[in-house]
Image: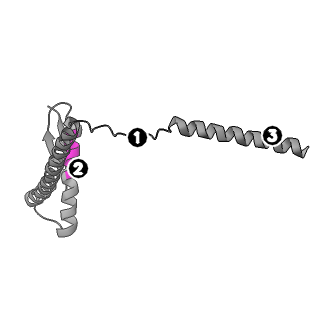
Amino acid sequence: MPEVTIHIGGRGFDVSCQDGEESFLQAAAKMLDDEAQVLSDQIGRMPESRMLLMAGLMLADKTAATEDKAKALEAKLAETEAELQTLRSAPAPEPERIEVAVVPPSVTDTLAELAARAEALASDIEEKAK
């Protein structure tokens, strides 16, 4: 079992850990040291046990707040997933019916006749203009 020296509040502590967990121990010690530094800056020098207790309590408070946020986010995620499942299981909406106006054949025939007359008149006018 490796032994690691960690520094918290300017004090060194020899701590044993499992093989391969040294970096995790150092990271945890850094978090505790950061809290101890805040205490030291605010209060000044204090007994080691009190400093460690207060720093631990500050970390526990941050952890509890983080857990509360995580629970709230998990609840929101569950709510969103339930809503999504409801939307996915809902029947598809009825297709929208779109009506396209149909031009009656008599109108088409009348328009064709008018076009033919207009072309004939245009031809007559062109011939007379020459």
Q: What residue occupies the far bottom of the structure in this picture? A: 43
Dividing the picture into quadrants, the one containing residue 57 is: bottom left
| SS at circle 1 | loop
Using the image, determine if residue 88 lies above or below residue 8. above
> Going from the N terminus, do you reach mark 1 or mark 3 first?
1
Query: Considering depth in this image, is 121 or 24 the residue closer to the camera?
Result: 121
| SS at circle 2 | helix
Inspect the image, locate mark 2, and give the three-letter code of the amino acid beneath it. Answer: Lys
The residue located at (22%, 43%) in the rendering is 26
Query: Considering depth in this image, is 97 or 125 the residue closer to the camera?
Result: 125
> Going from the N terminus, do you reach mark 3 or mark 2 first?
2
Q: Is residue 65 left or right of residue 95?
A: left
* Residue that numbered label 3 is attached to: 123
Foreground mark, 1 or 2, reads 1
Q: Is residue 27 left or right of residue 17?
A: right
- Counting labels gives 3
